[in-house]
Amino acid sequence: MRRSNINSEETFGQVRGGCDESTQGYPGMNPSRRKMLAKLSLALSAAVGLRRAHADEGEPEILRCRPLPPVTPDDVGPDKKFSVNGKAQRYPGNTVICHLPKQSEAFAELGRACAALRAEVGTRNLSWLPPDSYHMTVFDGATNAYRRPGDWPQMLPLDASMDACNRYLAERLRKFDLGLDPPIRMVVDEREFPGGYTLIPLRPVDARENRRLRDLRDRISVATGVRHPNHDSYRFHTSFAYYVRQFTADEEVSYQLALARTVQRLRKALPVIELAAPEYCLFDDMLAFPTQFLLRKL
């Protein structure tokens, strides 16, 4: 689970000679880090890249973008999602998500793709998530780690307990009108290469679906009193791992190539991903998101 302005008819950030632009709407990236990475990316692009020598004329443009420099893990350390040895730590919170249905082709294909990527990349630098955790976040709720206006329900004091916050959101969402009929239809977005991330980018299947999802997020925000700084620019995705140790520059290039190919294969294998009604979930760490109840149309 991570914290992602797009117009309904726009792509998220089509790769046109650089991945640095595509980082700006993804969760977990603060503005100063974005600027630093953009500058470093430009500086390194002449010397380090997904070189055209690696790509035949028939390979997609996604494989020819300039990579970001090696990522410094942001989710490792005390009170973070993972320990320095890559183990999941306690990180309680609540969220509204759609799990990938376990009997679906999407779940099977993503599982196979991530297993192949893991075999290619290894486990030293990434902490891989269990397939049972695979989901698309519809709306980030609140976490114990971020008790500040916008990230915490505005009707609750910032020192309210996490249990009180969980109960409050549950009460609000049980009375909430989903206002749409599932399924929610998404596609893998191979036009958006998430350089420097460990996720599969997703986008609504069309402009109408995008409007449905954006409207749903706006209404949940009003109901819960939570509106994160990236509310309008949030980009949908499915996470499969977290950075826990930094790659070398060459390793980062290899990883980005492997991820780009994985995204391309998934796009071809999954023309449409259908998700069921959003679920209100609680979590203690990033490994499991137990469903409390489904949001429903009243």
Image: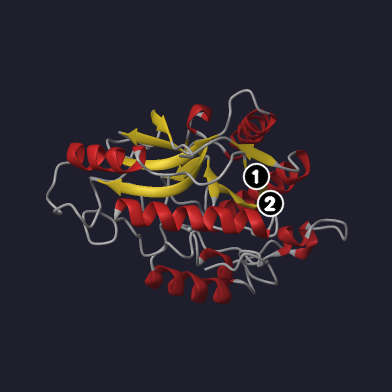
Query: What residue type is disc 2 on?
Result: Val
Residue closest to the far right: 58
Is the Cβ of the residue at disc 2 closer than 8 Å to that at disc 1?
yes
Query: What residue type is disc 1 on?
Result: Arg
Q: Which mark is residue 50?
A: none
Instruction: Kindly indicate the quadrant of the structure image that contains residue 103.
Output: top right
Depth check: give the residue in front, 220 or 31: 220
Q: Earlier in the sequence, mark 2 or mark 1?
A: 1
**Percent coordinates x, y for residue 47 in the rendering:** 63, 71
**Percent coordinates x, y for residue 82 in the rendering:** 34, 40
Residue closest to the far front: 298
Q: Which mark is residue 205?
A: 2
Left or right for 28, reference 193? left
Residue appearing at x 29%, y 36% in the figure: 89
Residue appearing at x 22%, y 57% in the figure: 154
- The mark total stands at 2
Mark 2–mark 1 distance (CA, rounded to whole Å):
6 Å
Assign the C terminus to one quadrant of the image: top left
Q: Secondary structure at mark 2?
A: loop
Residue closest to the far top: 103
Residue 159 in view: yes
**Percent coordinates x, y for residue 24 in the rendering:** 50, 67
Depth check: give the residue in front, 68 or 134: 134
Q: Residues within 10 Å of mark 2 (few under 14, many from 20)?
A: some
Residue appearing at x 50%, y 51% in the figure: 247
Q: Mark 1 sits on what residue? A: 185
Left or right for 282, reference 61? left
Depth check: give the residue in front, 251 or 171: 171
Q: Secondary structure at mark 1?
A: strand
Say above or below: 82 vs 57: above
Residue 125 in view: no
Q: Residues within 10 Å of mark 1 (few under 14, many from 20)?
A: some
